[in-house]
Image (spheres, coloured by chain):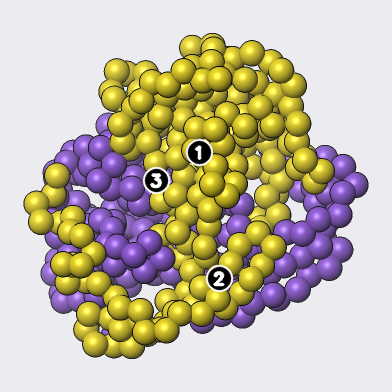
Chain colours: A yellow, B purple
């Protein structure tokens, strides 16, 4: 652990103090907060960020060599991406319950064996989003249930191929890159990457 | 390469067609675009995303065992994070030039040796941001030049310690996690992760 590097906010000399807070944009999928803050150097500035409910991603393995992937159109970038199943937390929803729900909805697979691989923050400059990562095994097909407007292609691939696609830039979605790295670490016998691995029996 | 998985947008059956586009929020640091789209299943829906200029991150090594890190307060999450130097592209700015500028501004170091490690998308659900990653070596201290309100602590650490901190969750910033993984891959003799490695002499 880096000595003296992690401090609680109250004693952190880098803390920025809120002077004024405003809901600047109330959108369909997210809100933007725009605050006036006092910086530690005395400067008064603006901070602007997205309020996000948090998300989960699932590294789902039909067998020990293979992961489930999706091809999904990502409008912000105007093209499809190869990525692992993922979704946003609903209000008050438990993280593991969300992972189990999203895996079934998007891929049609229910998993009996769940391990937490860790969590990361994907856009600390302008979003409070945190993505929790679970490994799902012992899969049974029960049928997918995507919503209207949620069109995706589900397929499977050897996880070593996926690792290669991240190395060559074919896969550039960061959560998917992290997922395959943490899977590699987990399978090599490391504990859960990015946090404690908790073996949990699914429903 | 996954057969038949990467298609140009024109022939992609997953394509979503813009019906109406609107600048929904014009903020200080980013804009939000909110469009009405037709999905491939015929559903008419809303897509909402941040327009981002793109960013660079620098894996900077004072020597072969060590990386430069920063501690910086991230207002969206209300606490400080350990991360690698990074910054946003200015209008029309070359990516490598941006990396060289940001490294000096934030850490005070000029690097003579630059290699591109790759690029990734960090929030494909709601942002068009792409982060390019460079490795910077042969460092000389020339003095930092942070802006008012840009307060950060610069320190160095063995990159193997950083890798350990990402495994235990002490470091959760996704760009920094990717940076140390791609550095490990690069130092192990792999080509640039996430794309082609280009050796470039810096200025």
- Residue on which disc 2 sits: A32
- The relative height of residue B97 versus residue A54 in the rendered view (above or below) is below
Label 2 sits on a secondary structure element that is: strand
Label 3 packing within 10 angstroms: few (<14), some (14-19), many (20+): many
User: Are dots 2 and 3 on a single chain?
Assistant: yes
Real-space Cα separation, disc 2 to disc 3, in angstroms: 21 Å
The answer to which of A73 and A96 lies nearer the viewer is A96
Q: Position of residue A32 (x, y in %)?
A: 55, 70
- Quick one: label 2 or label 3, which is nearer the N terminus? 2
In the image shown, does A198 or B43 lie closer to the viewer?
A198
Question: At x 47% / y 54%, what residue is drawn?
Answer: A129
Q: Tell me the SS state at disc 1.
A: loop
The percent coordinates of residue B75 (x first, y second) are: 36, 69
Which residue does the numbered mark 3 point to in the structure image? A120
- The structure residue drawn at horizontal position 76% and vertical position 31%, both measured from the top left corner, is A145
Residue B136, given in percent of the width and then of the height, sits at 27, 56
How dense is the environment of label 2, judged by Cα within 10 Å: few (below 14), some, or many (20 and up)? many
The answer to whether marks 2 and 3 mark residues whose Cβ atoms lie closer than 8 Å is no
Marks 1 & 2 on one chain: yes
Left or right, B7 with respect to B27, comes to right
Instruction: Using the image, determine if residue A7 lies above or below residue A58.
Output: below
- Image quarter where the N terminus of chain B lies is top right
Name the mark nearer the viewer: 2 or 3.
2
Dot 1: few (<14), some (14–19), or many (≥20) neighbours within 10 Å? few
């Amino acid at each position: 652990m880096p000595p003296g590097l992690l401090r609680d906010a109250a004693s952190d000399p880098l803390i920025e103090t809120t002077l004024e807070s405003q809901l600047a944009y109330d959108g369909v999928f997210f809100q933007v907060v725009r605050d006036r803050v006092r910086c530690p150097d005395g400067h008064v500035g603006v901070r602007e960020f997205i309020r996000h409910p948090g998300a989960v991603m699932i590294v789902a393995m039909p067998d020990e060599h293979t992961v489930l992937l999706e091809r999904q159109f990502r409008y912000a970038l105007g093209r499809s991406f190869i990525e692992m199943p993922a979704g946003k937390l609903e209000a008050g929803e438990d993280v593991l319950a969300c992972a189990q729900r999203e895996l079934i909805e998007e891929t049609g697979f229910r998993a009996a064996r769940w391990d937490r691989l860790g969590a990361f923050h994907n856009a600390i400059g302008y979003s409070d989003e945190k993505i929790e990562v679970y490994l799902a095994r012992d899969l049974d097909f029960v049928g997918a249930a995507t919503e209207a407007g949620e069109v995706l292609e589900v397929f499977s691939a050897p996880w070593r191929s996926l690792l290669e696609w991240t190395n060559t830039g074919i896969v550039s979605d960061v959560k998917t890159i992290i997922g395959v790295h943490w899977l590699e670490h987990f399978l090599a016998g490391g504990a859960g990457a990015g946090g404690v691995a908790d073996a949990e029996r699914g429903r």
